Image: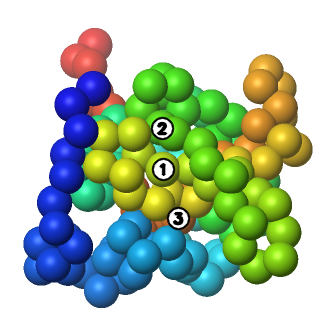
């Protein structure tokens, strides 16, 4: 996958304040406020910064945590996972592998088949609806 690198000033110009704060500065949206928290529409969830497909609606589940949750990414190559020791705890941060946008965190308390819960900020995502096939 080709890396997409831009100066921070360029990201600031291209993204909304919320997108910049979360994706480029590692912020977090408030729980239960994100656009995709309750979304059930079929499709993919792509990185809002670079358009890389990250998660599929078939892997989305209601974890009760307040953020969109997925039990697996579309591919392991689409994301990278990093140790995060902020806020006095150890977590695994999830970033877009292409543009290094902060997406959220992954926890080992998800459903089968993976047991993972990718807890992702809505503002870091762009939903692309699955095309409906004619009968």
- Secondary element at tag 1: strand
Quadrant of image for the C terminus: top left
Instruction: Give the residue drawn at x 39%, y 67%.
Output: 23
Crowd band around label 2 with a 10 angstrom C-alpha radius: few (<14), some (14–19), many (20+): many
Of the numbered discs 2 and 3, the one sitting upstream in the chain is 2
Position of residue 86 in the picture relative to residue 28 (left or right): right
Crowd band around label 1 with a 10 angstrom C-alpha radius: few (<14), some (14–19), many (20+): many
Of the numbered discs 2 and 1, the one sitting upstream in the chain is 2
Q: Quadrant of residue 105?
A: bottom right
Can the viewer see residue 77? yes
Between residues 38 and 3, which one lies in front from this camera angle? 3
Residue 27 screen position, x and y as percent: 52, 78
Between residues 97 and 7, which one lies in front from this camera angle? 7
Disc assigned to residue 40: none
Disc assigned to residue 79: 2
Residue 21 screen position, x and y as percent: 40, 81
Disc assigned to residue 121: 3
For the residues marked 2 and 3, what is the alpha-carbon distance in whole angstroms?
Answer: 14 Å
Instruction: Give the residue drawn at x 79%, y 21%.
Output: 113
Position of residue 26 in the picture relative to residue 70 (left or right): left
Q: Are marks 3 and 1 in contact (CB under 8 Å)?
A: no
Of the numbered discs 3 and 1, the one sitting upstream in the chain is 1
Q: Are marks 2 and 1 in contact (CB under 8 Å)?
A: yes
């Amino acid at each position: 996958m080709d890396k997409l690198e831009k100066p921070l000033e360029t990201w600031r110009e291209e993204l909304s304040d919320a997108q910049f704060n979360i994706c480029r500065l590692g912020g977090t949206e408030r729980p239960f406020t994100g656009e995709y928290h309750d979304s059930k529409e079929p499709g993919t969830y792509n990185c809002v910064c670079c358009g890389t497909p990250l998660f599929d609606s078939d892997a989305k589940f209601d974890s009760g945590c307040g953020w969109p949750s997925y039990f697996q990414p579309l591919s392991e190559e689409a994301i990278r996972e990093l140790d995060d020791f902020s806020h006095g705890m150890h977590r695994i941060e999830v970033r877009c592998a292409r543009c290094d946008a902060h997406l959220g965190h992954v926890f080992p308390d998800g459903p089968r088949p993976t047991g993972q819960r990718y807890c992702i900020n809505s503002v870091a995502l762009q939903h692309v609806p699955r095309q409906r096939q004619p009968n």
